[in-house]
Amino acid sequence: MTTVERDGAYTFDNGAPDAVPQMHALESFLDPITTRRLARPVLRAGATCWEVGAGGGSMARRIARAVGDEGHVLATDIDPTHLVAEENLHVRRHDVRTEPPPGDAFDLIHARLLLLHLPDRRRVLRTLSGALAPGGWLVVEEFDCTVPQRVLTAPSDDAAKLFAQVMDVMMGVLEDHGADLGWAQDVHTEMALAGLTELDTITHSQSWAGGSTGTSLYETNSRQLEPDLLAAGLSPNQLSAFRRLLQDPGFAVMSYHFVSTRGRLPG
Ligand SMILES: C[S@@+](CC[C@H](N)C(=O)[O-])C[C@H]1O[C@@H](n2cnc3c(N)ncnc32)[C@H](O)[C@@H]1O
């Protein structure tokens, strides 16, 4: 398993086999929450929308259904391997860090779990705000990785300690790749500074039991980042024990805190 080089580029590799279960786990956890956040008045039939860093494309497809035949959705990603075009859903390879926005009059721009990975996230947020139509909405959603993932139940104290240790190292690896673990808490303020109004932010977290789709996200991430985790001092035995723990029905943990912020360009 490889990761992209450390030049401020995205940490994970969309072309790697583990990217598929990673995207499925994210989508099954987050799509219901995001769908509620995009409900009317944010998303309406006939709207022109941009799904940035669309990943597996599930939200782009949901948005395309919501806007209907009169609407348009553009799904972009630096690696659009998993994106499939449909009638009113267009797909394009696009690097949001280096290329100009693919339009300047979007009624909705949605970016989920993207900006926290980008070192120039503040500049990119300004770029996204500048691509809105008057009255258009920007919805930015991130994990707040500064909140410790609280273990609720574990087969032993050592198991709970191992979970905390591996997650600590994993967060360090993400930071080394340029992620800002606390960026989720800055988005509301940054949107206000960009001139957006009608701002609101919610946070969602829930328990994840061992063997669930939620805990599978940690397992997949531990495989995707394995070379970095070993280089940071974890042993292969610790990683194996971590993965066994994530399958244990006696284990439960609070999920990542998911922060969703919406703002609107004055009309
Ligand atoms: C963690 S995934 C999230 C995918 C999707 N937004 C979701 O929430 O299901 C981040 C996505 O952002 C894309 N990405 C990373 N850097 C990017 C860039 N500079 N421009 C566009 N997309 C980028 C990645 O390829 C990946 O598909």
Image: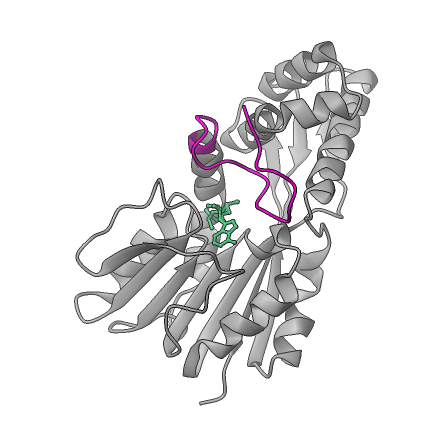
> How is this picture coloured?
one colour
Residue 186 in which image quadrant: bottom right
Residue at x-position 69% and y-position 73%? 189
Residue 67 visible: yes
User: How many numbered circles are shown?
Assistant: 0
| Above/below status of 139 relative to 164 | below
Residue 27 in which image quadrant: top left
Q: Is residue 12 magenta?
A: yes
Residue at x-position 46% and y-position 74%? 137
Residue at x-position 66% and y-position 17%? 245
Q: Residue furthest top?
A: 237
Nearer to me, 215 or 94 = 94
Residue at x-position 46% and y-position 63%? 99
Nearer to me, 55 or 9 = 9
In the rendering, at what x and y percent does residue 202 appear?
60, 62
Left or right of 47: which side holds 243? right
Residue range of the region highlighted in magenta in the rendering? 1-20
Q: Residue furthest bottom?
A: 267
Position of the N terminus by quadrant: top right
Left or right of 249: which side holds 133? left
Residue 169 in which image quadrant: top right
Left or right of 31: which side holds 241? right
In the rendering, at what x and y percent does residue 143 appear?
63, 50
| Above/below status of 91 relative to 245 | below
| Above/below status of 191 relative to 116 | below
In the rendering, at what x and y percent does residue 6 appear?
65, 41
In the rendering, at what x and y percent does residue 257 appear?
65, 48
Residue 258 visible: no
Q: Is residue 58 magenta?
A: no
Position of the C terminus by quadrant: bottom left
